[in-house]
């Protein structure tokens, strides 16, 4: 069982930045709904805190405030390239120190946060009717996040 203490401060910060970075990649993929998407990301953390979500390491991650460095990404393009690399790096850090179950639980949580952001805002409808719950751009972003996490949805 891996604990937070087994990571240095930089590694732990990198790990904590993963879930909100994944959500931000999805949010940046489509215009509109940013407030709803951000609220859904917060709810993903709250729901995970209430549920028995798995390994103790994931519980420590969920209990820690989500970290995101303001201004780290200057544009949506930079978020896509650096953010995806950030997710890949976070998985590499975990794979080096955590069990496979802990890594899988982290992957699942990161993808859950991204999914919540994607499903928060319908696009293409009129007065709330019709439209798509997840746009093509958001699905593309979800696919890129899943690939960075070393999994497919």
Image: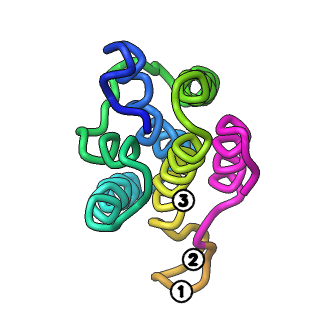
Residue 68 left/right relative to 96: left
Where, by quadrant of the figure, is residue 131 drawn? bottom right
Find numbered disc 2 in the image and state the secondary structure of the residue it sits on.
Answer: loop
Q: Give the residue at x 37% y 59%.
A: 44
Asked if residue 20 shows in the view, the reply is: yes
Give the spatial CA distance, label 2 vs label 1. Answer: 5 Å
Residue at position x 43%, y 23% in the image: 14
Q: Secondary structure at mark 3?
A: helix
In the figure, is residue 54 to the left or right of 46? right
- Helix, strand or loop for the magenta stretch, by majority: helix
Task: Using the numbered discs, state the Cα–Cα distance from disc 3 to disc 2 in whole angstroms.
Answer: 20 Å
The residue wearing badge 1 is 129
Q: State which region is magenta.
A: 133-153
Q: Which residue is mark 2?
A: 125
- Secondary structure, mark 1, is loop
Residue 49 placed where, x, y %?
28, 59
Residue designated by label 3: 115
Q: Mark 3, mark 2: which one is toward the viewer? A: 3
Image coordinates of residue 24 in percent, x first then y, are 46, 41
Q: Please count the marks in the image.
A: 3
């Amino acid at each position: 069982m891996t604990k937070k203490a087994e990571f240095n401060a930089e590694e732990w910060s990198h790990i904590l930045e993963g879930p909100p970075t994944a959500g931000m990649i999805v949010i940046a993929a489509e215009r509109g709904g940013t407030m709803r998407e951000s609220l859904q990301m917060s709810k993903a953390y709250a729901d995970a805190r209430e549920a028995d979500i798995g390994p103790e390491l994931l519980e420590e991650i969920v209990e820690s405030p989500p970290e995101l460095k303001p201004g780290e990404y200057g544009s949506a393009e930079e978020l896509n390239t650096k953010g995806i690399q950030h997710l890949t790096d976070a998985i590499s850090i975990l794979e080096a120190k955590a069990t496979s179950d802990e890594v899988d639980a982290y992957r699942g949580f990161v993808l859950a946060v991204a999914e919540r952001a994607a499903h928060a805002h319908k696009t293409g409808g009129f007065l709330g009717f019709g439209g798509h719950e997840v746009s093509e751009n958001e699905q593309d972003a979800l696919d890129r996040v899943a690939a960075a996490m070393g999994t497919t949805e």
